[in-house]
Amino acid sequence: MSGEALLEVNDLVKHFPIKRGILIDREVDQVRAVDGVSFTVNRGETLGLVGESGSGKSTACRAVLQLIKPTSGSVKFEGREIAGLGRRQMRPLRREMQMIFQDPYASLNPRKRVGQIVGDPLRRQGVAKGSELRKRVQELLERVGLASEHYNRFPHEFSGGQRQRIGIARALSLKPKLVICDEPVSALDVSIQAQIVNLLDDLQDEFDLAYLFVAHDIGVVRHISDRIAVMHDGKLVEQGTADQVCEHPKDDYTKKLLAAVPIPDPRESRERSASR
Amino acid sequence: MSPTPLLSVRDLRVGFATEAGLLQAVDGISFDLHQGEVLAIVGESGSGKSVTAQTIMGLTRSKNSRIEGSVQLEGHELTTAGDTELRGLRGDRIAMIFQDPMTSFNPVYRIGKQIVEAIHTHKPDLSKEDARARTVELFEAVGIPRAEQRVDDYPHQFSGGMRQRAMIAMALALAPDVLIADEPTTALDVTIQAQILGLLEDLNREQGLATILITHDLGVVAEVADRVLVMYAGRVVEEGTLDEIFYDPQHPYTWGLMGSLTRLDRPRPHRLPQIAGSPPSLLDLPEGCAFRPRCPHEFSKCPQLPGLEARLPEAPDHRDRCWLTPEQKREKRQVEGQIGLEAPTS
């Protein structure tokens, strides 16, 4: 059922106040982290969000998930307005939208066993418990390329790539419709990056997932995305299909960004620097 | 190319005593670095590339480390040099820039002051004013705008890219002959990365600075390197000129690295070619070729470690550690019309 809008973000704004003063906090200015952003993620589709550090892409993700409250704008999930919903109202929706984080070393509780980490969302949402929970967690671990024996291990016993697989298993445990991936491969070794990207690709087909894939590596984003949105200074400067944006960029900032990506080909790289 | 190298590393081995036994982080690496040359050392985490760099700088000396082999810098043996001798060479003849520009300055001192201090330590005769003037000059050379004012800023007032420039300025303060750059652009955005790489290139061309560039990014290598060492599990698995490594790679690990790159200038493949498995633990290396468990081309000779040898008659300086014949390699590395590592058959 692709082609149908799953997530519709309209004119999303998040401003952070800059305050000064000792007794009375006066708001002297604002950081316009996200400044009127609109995009749509369809069912089963991947929207890539690229931009440099400080462009507001992570803030946009957090505002979409209501982890921070948007200043204004609308976020519709399956047609329902979720901007401004409280924690309690969001809780049932958390099943449908999950997140995978950048740092596989910081995003897993070091004192919990892998089984607990992956099973926690299932337990908290009351989906499964006891031996049923254990069975489902072991199935998930196997699906993401780990072994069911890993159930009782601690995060520190795993490499970066394996930890990212644990994070993916946790995000998928509730069979979400949307997964927001915030720089999921940038902390990994080159040879492991391809493994995780391919795993995300396979899981998308299998579970009909939609991804909002945030990264600064345009090569990776282009590979995994159906469409790409380019963010700069809190605004989207360009949106289009992945090939369109990468091969025929319209916006000047997008062109500058693409021109800065090194080409892993010495001859072409020499040609390019000779023409600069 | 001048016959005597600035820096000459011979059979360097670095081991660390751990609770689980001796961890051989670097297991016999040799190379020469000439004036104006950029040597790239490529590898993943645990390949020994950073430990090599730190050992050259004398930063891995400790009770738990065992350093063997030789590192010669312009006639000085660095592995056995005393602290005073080493301190005199560091900064003056050889300098290093680190990956993380956020933690490389002391946050409570002004940036300019930290650089002036470094100059003053090596050149006590130079007046404070002159050292400061030199710092402003350096800031201008690395492209920091409003250099005169910015030397008095604190590190937190600098952006990541500017801090990396300031660190390069500090490394260049005493005009060293050799610069070691450990992942200098990994923490930076691509547009800033392009500027920093351009800056390093100018320094190589115009001042004859010799650079060891440590990176995992083959795109960066293609832009700036003259020669490349590919490291895996503490050993060099392939070395050659930039074009030899990119257009005639001999080791399956190099093919795998090339294959898994995402390239904006080519149509995207259906699946990203990947290298199966993960890098081995240095405490539990397989017998023979360390890449063997991940290699789809493994055969009966692989449990024996191949030497780092030139196997192509036409390229005497292109060496690799793989038992396959050059003909086999040319055939096996072609995956869907491009260089890559075949997917495992199982």
Image (tube, helix red, strand yellow):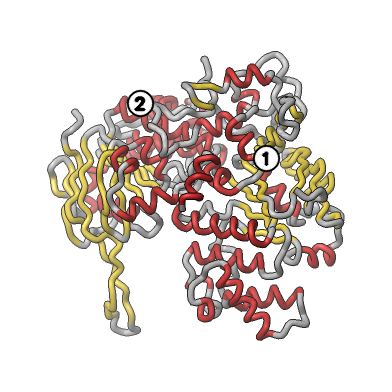
- Most extreme residue toward the front is A275
B208, A124: nearer the viewer: B208
Query: Residue at label 1?
Result: B229
- Mark 2 highlights which residue? A132
Q: Nearer the viewer, mark 1 or mark 2?
A: 1
Q: Is residue B155 left or right of residue B78?
A: left
Choose top left, top right, bottom left or bottom right for residue A225.
Answer: top left
Question: Horizontally, is B326 left or right of A135 in the view?
Answer: right
Q: A67 or B24: nearer the eye?
A: B24
Up-down relation of residue A23 to residue A112 (above or below)? below
Closest to the observer, A190 or A150: A190
Residue B212 appears at what percent x and percent y? Answer: 67, 51
The three-letter code of the residue at mark 1 reads Leu
Q: For the point 50% across and 50% down, which residue is it?
A: A273
Secondary structure of the residue carrying tag 2 is: helix
- Badge 1: chain ID: B
Seen at 74% across and 51% down, the residue is B34
- Mark 2 belongs to which amino acid? Glu
- Assess disc 1: are there few (<14), some (14-19) or many (≥20) residues with their C-alpha within 10 Å of its C-alpha: many
CA gap between label 1 and label 2 equals 51 Å
Residue A133 spot, x, y in % from top left: 36, 29
